[in-house]
Image (cartoon, grey):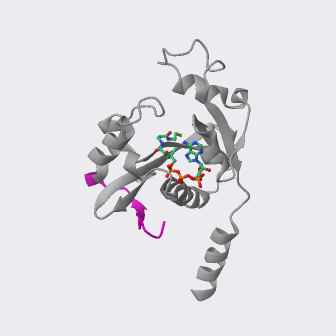
Amino acid sequence: MKNFPMVIRPAEFHDVESIFRLIKHYPNELLPRAISDIVQNIDRFLVGEMNGKVVGTVSWQILPEIGADKAPSVEIKSVAIENSLRRKGLGQALVQGAINRIRTIQPCQIIVLTFTPDFFASMGFKVVSKRKLIHKIYAGCINCTKYDSPFTCPEVAMALVLSPSTTVKRSITKRKATT
Ligand SMILES: CC(C)(COP(=O)(O)OP(=O)(O)OC[C@H]1O[C@@H](n2cnc3c(N)ncnc32)[C@H](O)[C@@H]1OP(=O)(O)O)[C@@H](O)C(=O)NCCC(=O)NCCS
């Protein structure tokens, strides 16, 4: 990471085309995202920037149908690092940034559907049964023509169960104490 300084920041509208291109580069690993979809959800994207260029992206989506009303699940999706910069720890840094952001809204868990389970396992995600995410899976796979069923597809369902963030609570307590 030292030789590859990457700034992680919330995405802005001028990043839309770069995000679109990064995701489009991995048609076998990632569901495509239309420009309009990226624009409408730009506040749910982080980007990694290096020397003024967007070299990575990650986004998330709230899944109110999985989990409790007051603590739904959040899915991490559209994780991509520029091909020439893979395996240098950038993906991990970007996803950790997304996890930190997602923690602040206190969902019960973060889920992911992935063909790269070892990457997410390196950040503490555990494999879960696809049956636990059936609503999400049918919605996400509805246009898939590669596999006859989500259960024959090699994509792996994983979850990171979150306990309420002590970091968030501490900073709120501190703010109260100073006002
Ligand atoms: C998957 C992806 C985001 C990982 O980003 P990255 O910057 O290459 O990964 P990192 O260097 O942060 O990897 C951290 C660890 O995760 C694991 N890992 C990462 N990519 C892996 C792979 N393809 N296969 C197995 N393990 C992998 C390794 O343990 C790695 O540590 P190591 O390099 O010291 O062995 C990136 O390769 C990518 O953009 N892939 C194409 C799109 C994609 O598959 N997105 C994920 C779909 S949800």
* Residue 70 makes an appearance in the image: no
The quarter of the displayed image where residue 27 is located = top left
Residue at position x 41%, y 62% in the image:
9
Does 89 sit above or below residue 33? below
Residue 32 location (% of width, % of height): 40, 32
Q: Nearer the viewer, residue 179 or 121?
A: 121
Magenta-colored span = 1-14
Q: Quadrant of the C terminus?
A: bottom right
Residue 6 included in the magenta stretch of the image: yes
Check the image and name the residue furthest to the bottom: 178
Q: Nearer the viewer, residue 105 or 6?
A: 6
Residue 31 location (% of width, % of height): 45, 31
Residue 4 included in the magenta stretch of the image: yes
Instruction: Judge from the rendering whether residue 172 lies leftward or rightward of residue 58; answer left or right.
Output: right
Does 10 sit above or below residue 145? below
Residue 145 location (% of width, % of height): 48, 14
Residue at position x 69%, y 52% in the image:
124
* Residue 133 makes an appearance in the image: yes
Does 144 sit above or below residue 61? above
The quarter of the displayed image where residue 111 is located = top right
Residue 102 location (% of width, % of height): 57, 55
Residue at position x 38%, y 49% in the image:
84
Does 66 sit above or below residue 173? above
